[in-house]
Amino acid sequence: MASFAVIPAAPILLADVDLAEASQAGQMRAAIESCLSTRSEWALPVRQLPPLAGLGGLGIDRGIDTRTNELLESEDWVQAVSELNPADRALCESAHPAIAVALLHAHSAGVRIGALPDSESPADSGALASNENLLVPIDLSAAASEEAPLAPVPGAAQADERIVAALSADDPRSVVTAVAAAVDVHADLELLEAAAAHMWAHRSSDYSFTTVFDEYLHEVRSLCGTGTY
């Protein structure tokens, strides 16, 4: 039986990103890191980690060197980015942005993250051999209300509700179905889709999910929870 954790992919929940953050955000961050601390290693539902993953796209010089698990900030981060060869730079630019958020939370919690082991080549691409504990960063819809960051989209709130309900169901196929029904609501569920497909392929009878928090932050629903599969 393996574990999984669902966490918000929002960079704003990382430390020192929102300098005017409310106490609610700090409490949510502490809950995320507490969940991550239950395991020493996690795997993201991707086959390869980029060499560097950080917040450069937000104008923040901070990130993780996945080759060493080192936190790089300020000039160290800028220098590491400048030294990337073209192939590695392309990997970094094409990586899912939630990877950086997950890595930074994990670093704060003192745990390691790798890529999901490939049955054909488990040692490739930064995979943590035999680790099946999945870390799944998601963004629910940013268009589910009049006050949300994006213009409201019909059905967005209902799509969010289906995702949350599906995670609490007893079958990861429900998650796959709910993700497929949320393609047009401005949610980022790419890594959840990959994780649910992996869990369904695992075909375990031990699937469960427990909500740690389900709250609204800046009018966007944020979900964190842990489970088994």
Image: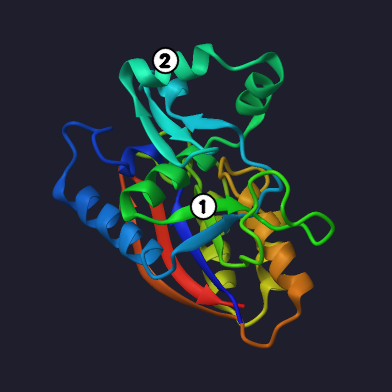
Residue 25 lies left or right of residue 55; in this view the side is: left
**Residue 49, above or below 51:** below
Query: Where residue 35 appears, x then y in whole percent?
Result: 37, 66
Residue displayed at 70% across by 58% down: 117
Amino acid bearing label 2: Val
Which residue is nearer to you in this view: 97 or 77?
77
Q: Badge 1: how crowded within 10 Å, few (<14), some, or many (20+)?
A: many
User: Residue 188 appears in which quarter of the rendering?
Assistant: top right
Which residue is nearer to you in this view: 20 or 14?
14
Mark 2 or mark 1, which is nearer the start of the sequence?
2
- In the picture, the disc for residue 175 is none
Q: Alpha-carbon distance for marks 1 and 2?
A: 22 Å
Q: Secondary structure at mark 2?
A: helix
Query: Where residue 142 appears, x then y in whole percent?
Result: 46, 41
Q: Residue furthest bottom?
A: 205
| Image quadrant where one finds the C terminus | bottom right
Instruction: Check if mark 1's residue and mark 2's residue have beta carbons within 8 Å.
Output: no
Q: Secondary structure at mark 1?
A: strand
Q: Badge 2: how crowded within 10 Å, few (<14), some, or many (20+)?
A: some
Q: Which residue carries the number 2 mark?
A: 78
Amino acid bearing label 1: Ile
Q: Which residue carries the number 1 mark?
A: 113
Which residue is nearer to you in this view: 123 or 195?
123
Residue 32 lies left or right of residue 159; in this view the side is: left
Tally of numbered discs: 2
Query: Where residue 222 appears, x then y in whole percent?
Result: 39, 54
Query: Where residue 225 appears, x then y in whole percent?
Result: 43, 68
Which residue is nearer to you in this view: 60 or 13?
60
Residue displayed at 72% across by 65% down: 198
Residue displayed at 54% across by 35% down: 97
Residue displayed at 32% across by 41% down: 14
